[in-house]
Amino acid sequence: MLVERRFLQVDVFGSGPYYGNPVAVVLDGSGLDDAEMSRFARWTNLSETTFLLPPARPEADYRVRIFTPAGELPFAGHPTLGSAHAWLARSSPASGRNVFVQECPAGLIRLRLADRRLSFAAPPLVRYEPVDEPTVAHLADLLGVDRVEIRAAQWVDNGPGWVAVLLASAEEVLRLRPRPEEGLSLGVVGPHPEGSEAAIEVRAFFSSGGVTFEDPVTGSLNASLAQWLLDTGRVGAPYTASQGAALGRRGRVFIERDDDGTIWVGGDTFTCVEGTVDL
């Protein structure tokens, strides 16, 4: 039997509504099985659809399941912020409280709210090492650039398999017309001129079914890039990353680092669609 459930579509990481990356959020996923969640995620046809559930662990405020049209993810950045936005809109936590915990298949994710902007604590990297030279040459070929144009390349995988390439400038990043291969999650970054609003320009590419996709704004990639770029002194915290310009978006990701080394990945969130769905 279908049940009427509250629903939000939230724009995440945008410099204003409709400039970021949308996520569909079902505010009460109780009673839905995997097949029902997958079917709805395929129907929304967004990169991710999430379902809020009561937490299973006492440390968590809520639990979330994240689905793409192809299957479930253990963690993703913009769905985490969009889900937190929806949970806050529904739950009205105690006044003055600004730290929350999300439970997901990847574990417990810390979030904080400051000046009405949400941030998540970057998850640990599962692969963090320089890319070998034959692979760098292959990445140059996929990107359509000369090998000498790649200033550095690093595995920065926090779950989705990210490999990152550094180019000399944001302008070079925006000129790219790549052809990523199946199974490769490829992030490209380049610095903006000194004094610009954003320190770096980011683009994220992947392929599925022989088709290349570009993600408008990517929380997980920006989280892993931050660790690499801060570790190597290529940027200093806090800084702002720009993403999505090549797609007509104006994404902004705000990176901070605490004294204990925790990297926080923040962005603005906007409710753009609100109503109910029958599921």
Image: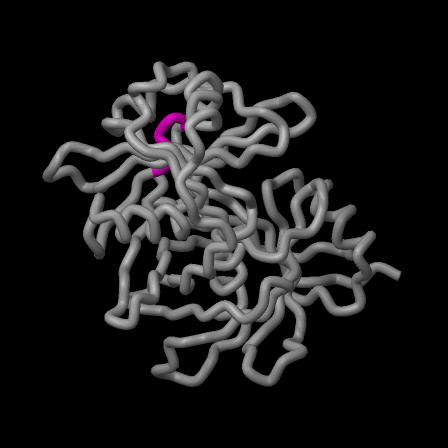
Quarter holding the N terminus?
bottom right
Q: Residue furthest right?
A: 1
Residue found at x 64% / y 63% = 105
Q: What percent of the width, then of the height, locates residue 272?
A: 49, 49
- Examine the residues drawn in magenta and state their main secondary structure: helix
Q: What percent of the width, then of the height, locates residue 87?
A: 53, 68
Quarter holding the C terminus?
bottom right
Q: Residue 44 falls in which quadrant of the image?
A: top right
Residue found at x 47% / y 25% = 134
Image position of 12 (left or right of 83): left
90 in relation to 210, above or below: below
Observer-nearest residue: 242 or 231? 231
Q: Is residue 241 magenta?
A: no
Q: What percent of the width, then of the height, locates residue 108?
A: 54, 71
Q: Residue furthest left?
A: 195
Residue found at x 62% / y 33% = 183
- Snapshot colouring: one colour
Image position of 145 (left or right of 186): left
Residue found at x 30% / y 19% = 148
Q: What percent of the width, then of the height, locates residue 239?
A: 23, 50
Residue range of the region highlighted in magenta in the rendering: 243-247
Q: Is residue 244 magenta?
A: yes
Q: Residue furthest front?
A: 133
Q: Residue 47 falls in which quadrant of the image?
A: top right
Give the number of marks.
0
